[in-house]
Image: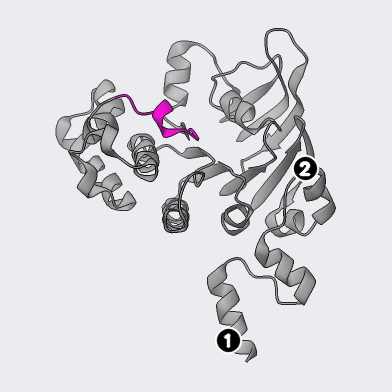
Amino acid sequence: MFKVTDLCISYENQADVLHHLSLDFSNHKAVGILGANGSGKSTLFAAIVGLLRPTQGEIIYEDRPLDYKKSALYQYRQEVGIVFQEPDHQIFYSIVEDDVAFALKNLGIAPAQIQIRMDEVFSLLKIEHLKKKPVQYLSYGQKKKVAIASVLMLKTKWLLLDEPTSGLDPAGKQQMIEIISQLLQQGTKIILSSHDMDLMYEICDYLYVIDKGTIIKEGKSDQVFLDEEVLKTAGLEQPWLVKVHQQLGFPLVKNQQEFMRTKMKAR
């Protein structure tokens, strides 16, 4: 079981930023958190990984409320990892392989095992050529992959991705979609936050829509994205595939590849 119950968050005794949020991640592979800037998505993510302590409510993981003792959080974050929107917030060493290996070295894992796991992660992300490279010479997209690599080294059961495609060019976005898809196929469960509605539609099987710190809709991906009025209320747009379905009558498909196959069959 992994869920958030009646969560409220406030800063320095001010009014709540998040208002009585309840979300259940337990039965889904890829859960999306939708919302405009300032809606509370990043605050929710910080609460889920224990960086913020709620003023009310709980994070429940494996049937137990989250324990905020340092040792308990350390253990929890080996199973629930986060990749922040800005990779520089997560990269601390000057050489890529040193940064990626840090967490396992800190856990006392044998160097040979670290190397095996590093080879697996670098291969998955296709960044083998960056191992010895100084971080200062990496592009923004490369830094994002390094930040993801450092978390994947822990083989977390859950991975939180905050705006994984922001700042990436179209090729970088497609690579990120492929990486996320591969992680899901390997059994990693993902909680995803993004302004990229096409990404969210393609990847997520369940969605929560947040507006001003309150959940205004939840449900399966297609159900949520077909509700144009709710999305407008939250300051969001429908994915292009959903627009094509509703406005032009094309079958509702999940990604561009399915759309092209359907289009070819219709000729």
Would residue 112 be found to the left or right of residue 94 on screen?
A: left
Q: CA distance from mark 2 to mark 1?
A: 35 Å
Identify the secondary structure beneath mark 1: helix
* Quadrant of res 8: top right
The residue nearer to you, when weighing 203 against 57, is: 203
Q: Is residue 64 shown above or below 141?
A: above
Q: Where is residue 258 drawn, in percent x and y?
A: 57, 74
Count of numbered marks: 2
Instruction: Look at label 1 and name its amino acid.
Output: Met
Mark 1, Cα crowd under 10 Å, few <14 / some 14-19 / many 20+, is few
Q: Where is residue 19 drawn, in percent x and y?
A: 77, 25
| Quadrant of the frame with the N terminus | top right
Q: Where is residue 215 drawn, in percent x and y?
A: 77, 36
The residue nearer to you, when weighing 82 against 136, is: 136
Mark 2, Cα crowd under 10 Å, few <14 / some 14-19 / many 20+, is many
Q: Where is residue 86 drawn, in percent x and y?
A: 46, 33
Residue 87 is inside the magenta segment? yes
Q: Which mark is residue 234?
A: 2
> Residue at the spot x=67%, y=30% of the render?
4
State the scheme by which the image is colored. one colour
Instruction: Look at label 2 and name its amino acid.
Output: Ala
* Comes first in the chain, label 2 or label 1: 2
> Residue at the spot x=71%, y=77% of the render?
250
Q: Which mark is residue 18?
A: none
In magenta, the rendered stretch is: 84-92
* Residue receiving disc 1: 264
> Residue at the spot x=74%, y=50% of the render?
219
Q: Is residue 188 shown above or below 39?
A: below
Identify the secondary structure beneath mark 2: loop
| Quadrant of the frame with the C terminus | bottom right
Is the magenta region chiefly helix, strand or loop?
A: loop
Would residue 35 be found to the left or right of residue 30 on screen?
A: right
